[in-house]
Image (tube, helix red, strand yellow):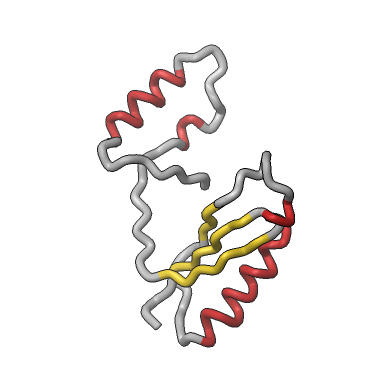
Amino acid sequence: TAMLLVPEWIGAEMVTTARAKVAKKKEPPTALELVRLETLDEGRCIQTLHIGSYDDEAQTLAELHEQVIPSRGCQMTGRHHEVYLSDPRRTEPSRLRTILRQPVMAC
């Protein structure tokens, strides 16, 4: 799931209208029907900054899940998500910065 931050004044009706306009184009995107407005309310999270290639995130995420979270007495409560801070078109892979966030129950 790709997520975009939108202003609070964007409502479901605006998203529906935009999808309808795009659907009328000659070749609309195949995943257009999946576009939706959703609020992410993740609550308490543990996060870490990963610096490096996206391909190397698995090791950082495994450390977060298997060491950091259990060592703090926390329990994971949902799927992790990633916040990309770098533009991969302009940043060499070893310098990419990504926040890895994992929702947890109160520790």
Give the image location of residue 49, x and y in percent.
57, 65
Q: Which residue is drawn at 34% across and 58% down?
A: 41
Q: Who's the residue at 44% across and 36% down the image?
A: 35
The total number of labels drawn is: 0
Q: Which residue is drawn at 54% across and 60% down?
A: 99
**Occupied quadrant, residue 21:** top left
Residue sitting at x 72%, y 61%: 56
Q: Position of residue 93 (x, y in %)?
A: 73, 51
Residue 32's place in the image compared with 82, above or below, is above
Residue 57 rendering spot, x and y as whole percentages: 67, 62
In this rendering, position of residue 70 left or right of residue 20: right
Q: Where the C terminus falls, by quadrant? A: bottom left
Q: Is residue 33 above or below residue 38?
A: above
Depth check, front residue: 36 or 58: 58
Tell me: 35 left or right of 58: left
Who is closer to the viewer here, 101 or 104? 101
Residue 105: which quarter of the image?
Answer: bottom left
Asked whether 44 or 85 is in front, the reply is 85
Task: In this rendered view, identify the residue nearer to me: 95 or 54.
Answer: 95
Is the residue 103 above or below the residue 86 in the image?
A: below
Displayed quadrant of residue 24: top left
Whole-percent x and y of residue 65? 57, 75
